[in-house]
Image (spheres, helix red, strand yellow):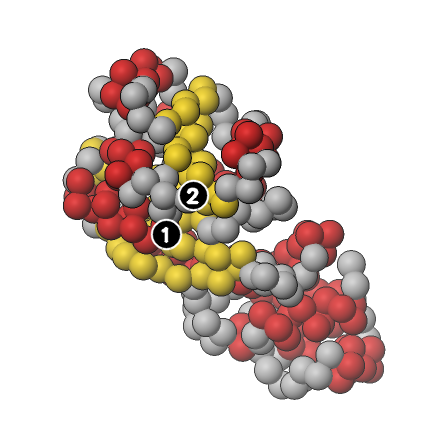
């Protein structure tokens, strides 16, 4: 079946790669996996082979009959619909209400990576999130302070989850090949997030504002971004225990969280 360009479909069919991605997800016999976009079912099969129960959300109705025929005798449930419109907590409730641990896994369309990350990290949280994404995005998610890849997206994700990049996948492994290479990113929600859910949007606004001045001193960036005086900026940074000579790109995630606590919205 031909992948649909309008849905951003790039199918991965190499069983060895699919097995490695399933392994990277950590899914096992006690887990429920919510799979986003199963496509032709290659990754689904790899997850089932590890003993997991798989509930898959697929928007492309063409694939439904094929998936049911291929996997109908296994521990698999297919839900036809848009993953951005469905309530994930309601989808997994029949299993989580019985105490089953759940994980999110998916070879996701590149063009909706950000909203799918946001949905996956909105409570109630899964045990982990494993997505196949653009390599550039994976690099940004896992970046450390001081580099060009470190930015608002990094801070927002790392404030609520620990990030690793278990493996990379070249563009030639897909059909059709995308224009960029990919990577598997594995997110484990923090037991105690650095910000509560109500603060996530405020942290995003603060980091986006300050990274607009990433090469300036944080003292100047804060004045420009928030319209405060030099004296006020100095007082804010002192209260947050942040060196006024640092640039925004050098601040740690914890620095941004402390700064948010002082400046608020």
Instruction: Tell me, yes or no, whether the two marked residues, 2 and 1, touch with CB atoms within 8 Å.
Output: yes
Residue 212 visible in rendering: no
**Number of numbered discs overlaid on the protein picture:** 2
| Left or right: 182, with 244 as reference point | left
Residue 33: x, y in percent? 42, 39
| Residue 214, picture quadrant | bottom right
Residue toward you, 263 or 215 = 263
Residue beneath the point at 64% across and 75% down: 255
Is 235 left, or right, of 34 in this rendering? Answer: right
Where residue 204 sits: x, y (%)? 64, 56
Q: Which mark is residue 47?
A: none
Local secondary structure at mark 1: loop
* Horizontal and vertical percent position of residue 142: 43, 63
Choose top left, top right, bottom left or bottom right for residue 94.
top right
Q: Identify whether 14 is placed above or below 56.
A: below
Image location of residue 226, percent across then percent down: 75, 65
Q: Is residue 119 visible?
A: yes
Q: Which residue is mark 2?
A: 31
Q: Nearer the viewer, residue 147 or 260?
A: 260
Dot 1 corresponds to which residue? 26
Quadrant in which the C terminus is drawn: bottom right
Residue 196 sits in quarter: bottom right
Q: Residue furthest front?
A: 98
> Dot 2, how many residues are within 10 Å of its Cα: few (below 14), some (14-19), or many (20+)?
many
The quarter of the picture where the N terminus appears is top left
Question: Is residue 132 positioned above or below 157 on the image?
Answer: above
Which-is-in-front pick, marks 2 and 1?
A: 2
Q: Residue at x 26, y 38 (%)?
A: 49
């Amino acid at each position: 079946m031909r992948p649909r360009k309008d849905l951003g479909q790039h199918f991965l069919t190499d069983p060895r790669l699919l097995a490695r991605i399933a392994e990277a997800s950590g899914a096992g016999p006690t887990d429920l996996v919510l799979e986003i976009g199963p496509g032709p079912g290659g990754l689904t099969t790899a997850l089932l082979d590890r003993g997991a129960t798989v509930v898959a959300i697929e928007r492309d109705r063409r694939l439904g009959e094929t998936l049911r025929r291929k996997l109908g005798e296994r521990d698999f449930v297919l839900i036809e619909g848009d993953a951005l419109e469905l309530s994930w907590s309601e989808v997994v409730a029949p299993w989580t209400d019985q105490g089953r641990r759940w994980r999110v896994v998916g070879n996701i369309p590149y063009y909706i990576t950000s909203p799918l990350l946001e949905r996956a990290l909105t409570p109630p949280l899964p045990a982990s999130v494993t997505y196949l994404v653009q390599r550039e995005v994976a690099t940004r998610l896992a970046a450390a302070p001081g580099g060009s890849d470190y930015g608002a997206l990094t801070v927002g994700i790392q404030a609520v989850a620990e990030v690793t990049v278990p493996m990379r996948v070249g563009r030639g492994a897909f059909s059709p090949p995308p224009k960029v290479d990919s990577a598997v990113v594995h997110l484990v929600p923090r037991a105690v997030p650095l910000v509560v859910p109500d603060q996530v949007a405020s942290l995003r606004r603060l980091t986006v504002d300050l990274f607009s001045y990433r090469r300036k001193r944080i003292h100047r960036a804060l004045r420009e971004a928030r319209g405060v005086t030099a004296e006020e900026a100095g007082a804010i940074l002192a209260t947050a225990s942040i060196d006024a000579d640092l640039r925004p790109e050098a601040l740690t995630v914890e620095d941004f969280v402390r700064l948010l606590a002082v400046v608020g919205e």
